[in-house]
Image: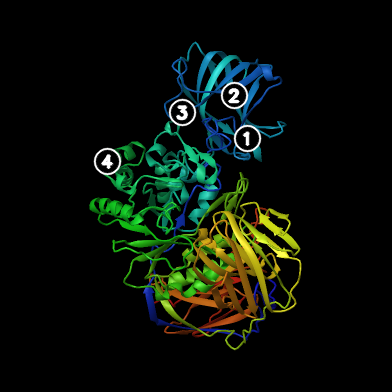
Amino acid sequence: MTYKKSILLTGCALFALAIQAQVTIDIDTQQRGPKVSPMLYGIFYEDINHAADGGIYAELIRNRSFEDGPRYGAPADMQGWTTDATAPSLLSAKLIQPSKKAPLLNSAQHNALELTVKASKESPVRLVNEGFWGINAVQGRSYHLTFWAKALKYQGNVKAMLYSHDGSQIYAETMVSSLSSSNSKGWKKYEATLTADGNDPKARFALVFDGVGQVQLDMVSLFPPTFKNRENGMRPDLANMLWQMHPKFMRFPGGCFVEGQESPDNAFRWERTIGPIEEREGHWNVNWGYRTTDGLGYHEYLQLAEDLNAKPLYVVNVGLWHGGMTPYDNIQPWIDECMNALEYANGPVTSKYGALRAKNGHPEPFGIEYIEVGNENNQPDPNQQSDHYYERYEQFYKAIREKYPEMKIIGNVVAWGDDNPKWNSKLPVDLLDEHYYRSPDWFAAAFHKYDSYDRQGPKVYVGEYAVTNGYGNLGNMNAALGEAVYMMGMENNSDVVELASYAPIFVNENDARWRPDMIRFNSSRVMGTPSYYVQQLMPQHLGTQVVKVVQNNPYKDVARKPLPPKQSRVGFGTWSTHASFETVKEYDYVKGDWNKEGNIVRQTGLKDATLCIEKNVIDSDHYTCKFRARKDEGAEGFIIIFNYVDDKNYCWVNFGGWTNSQHAIEQISNGGKLLTASKRGHIESGRWYDVTLQVAGDSVKAWLDNELVFDTVLKHDETKGIFSSATIDDATGELIVKVANTSDVATTANVNLKNFTPASARVVRLAANDGMEENTLDAPTTIHPVEQLLSPENNSVQFDVPPYSLNIIRLTAPAKP
């Protein structure tokens, strides 16, 4: 590890940090704080980025039921499938729909594949599936094949094989059956086992035909060994990554996946996702752009939670979906759906749905104890999948509480655009679900966020949080450390924060719809980001009660005098909006789809964070600039940029941000955003505004027409430095001290102990050479935990604190005589 000492740069402030010789942390183990919630850390699962099909759901065949298409609303096609014959006339394939003359497998299936075969033993033909960007063939591994077929005037054999994508090598081959229309008058299920004798992450699967006639196929499925050997189960390496996090609960099935988009049929409807896989219709995951088989269904979610020793936390739809709703006074069918789901999970085998659960292989109740009423449905704007949320919540609450009085019921609060959301109702609620997608600096600055929360109010569930600004490419160390500091703050306030879960978990590198995600994978490999290792380490090292920490500030004597850049530029931008700006100056179009006609520069695309920067360099930290701006159409208003150094370090005034609901000044540093000031505000479409911006060192004033909107001072970066916390484990007697260094300066720390004499000590450390450093699939352990023994002396222990590091020190007490 290379320790370094350097200048820290923010987009709007530059300052040097000197370092003292040592950080001192004083701990008296008799000075206790709140009990730590035993349920504090869990996981939030959503089918995003092919997290299910092509992800943790172990199915290897893509488009197994021939229902997939290129996009929502388009007819199904042969996605994932091809034919391989020496001449096209030897094998042709077409999708068929149900008819009286040709009924399909069952009513859940809308398509089947009909093959016309003209082959022979000397010239067999193949129906090929590429899997999800390759099928991972592993030497010695056995794969279970099932499919349904109906022979129509066909005589011949069917073999199954795994082979290389170029056809040069066969890894597994087995005879499945002879197909004959004379002895098969209807649909029949076939099974076989393939055992690979080679390794290939890009292998393909094929059914090989050597006869003549017509064959109809449906539900072609291929499974490798699964986690806990579950039928219709999970991919072991991905499930094991979750297992290593020791989650106390698992929130499912989303997220936006709960609500769906454009139609209630695209929401998660649990009863359509249980039972034999050939009887599951599947549905379009419109929110994230692909179809899901629902092979990972309600029963499998509950089973996975059980296999992870995590309590299930179920999120229910309150009659809202993206783009539509059921009127709030007509949602009884949605309530019934919720209550039926709870009966399936918790009811006795003598109940209707408890009996169905037992029929599906799980007689004992799964035991749901937590339920969330809606997902991000309590927004101030009714157009943001929100409508009469409290009225909807009340109806669900009454029904749930009457039948399940011990159930913990979670309510929604504002999910974006508000750092301090509130429950604006007198209705009872057990926990409130807060969501934060912010920058590393925001999370570090939120170390004390929950110190001032009302101890008599509802508990908090931080249901979704992650660094989404300034995370780098896949997720860097800065992001992980910001989240770690925030988690330390949650631990310190565990009497308020009862549950927390990072979001999202998974991304298949071949179809990333959202970044960052803490576990990245392809057909054969998996890696964790630094954020994953933070999420793994924090639950592994969690005591039962907070212990008070007194830490000296190693930077307390250093003057933090900001130095705004002496040379910078100004400009403008947009966020998911078409906007026009009047100017005669020359610009660099840094990001976005800009078009200039005369004195008007227009943003014609709908990208986020577009940038158009004046070529002229301002050689001063005192300046005034003026702009004329107009919102043409789109979700938000327009942006004025100042103190621009490069595309990752600048400031902006965002007029009409957060879906045109508020104005804000934000400071962008290394790609991460820090909120300086905000207020309610709205930008009208089609109207020209005169904007004046006055910068005087740290002071910033901004006018919209003649209204002074902001008169503020840019924030100094107080998030670079040492953060510490401690808990004690009453079961083992161990003291656990966490020390995070978010700066680029190495130091040492000395923990002075009172009423605790350590017999031994060790440190588990996650560290990087640079805050921007990341893991990749090719280098998955660039940043990973390492362990080192320490040597305590009397009532103290000293250890190194590298830059960009999370250090967890475990101190054991002497054995009792």
N-term-proximal mark, 4 vs 3: 3
Cα separation between marks 1 and 4: 42 Å
Residue 437 image offset from top left, x and y in percent = 52, 62
N-terminal label among 1 and 2: 1
Q: Nearer the viewer, mark 1 or mark 2?
A: 1
Q: Amino acid at mark 1?
A: Glu
Q: Amino acid at mark 4?
A: Val
Characterize the local packing of mark 1: few (<14), some (14-19) or many (20 or more) Cα atoms within 10 angstroms.
Answer: many
Observer-side mark, 1 or 4, equals 1
Residue 159 circle label:
2
Q: Earlier in the sequence, mark 3 or mark 1?
A: 3
Name the N-terminal-most of marks 2 and 4.
Answer: 2
Image position, residue 747 (x, y; %): 62, 80
Question: Does label 2 or label 3 sit earlier along the sequence?
Answer: 3
Q: CA distance from mark 2 to mark 4?
A: 42 Å
Q: Secondary structure at mark 4?
A: loop
Circle 1: element type: loop
Q: Which residue is mark 3?
A: 109
- In the image shown, does 571 or 314 lie closer to the viewer? 571
Q: Quadrant of residue 614?
A: bottom right
Residue 130 is tagged as 1
Q: Is residue 569 visible?
A: yes
Dots 4, 3 in contact, CB < 8 A = no
* Quadrant placement of the N terminus: bottom right
Label 4: which residue?
Answer: 349
Given contact means CB atoms under 8 Å apart, are the residues at marks 2 and 3 in contact? Answer: no
Q: Earlier in the sequence, mark 1 or mark 4?
A: 1
Q: Nearer the viewer, residue 276 or 757?
A: 276
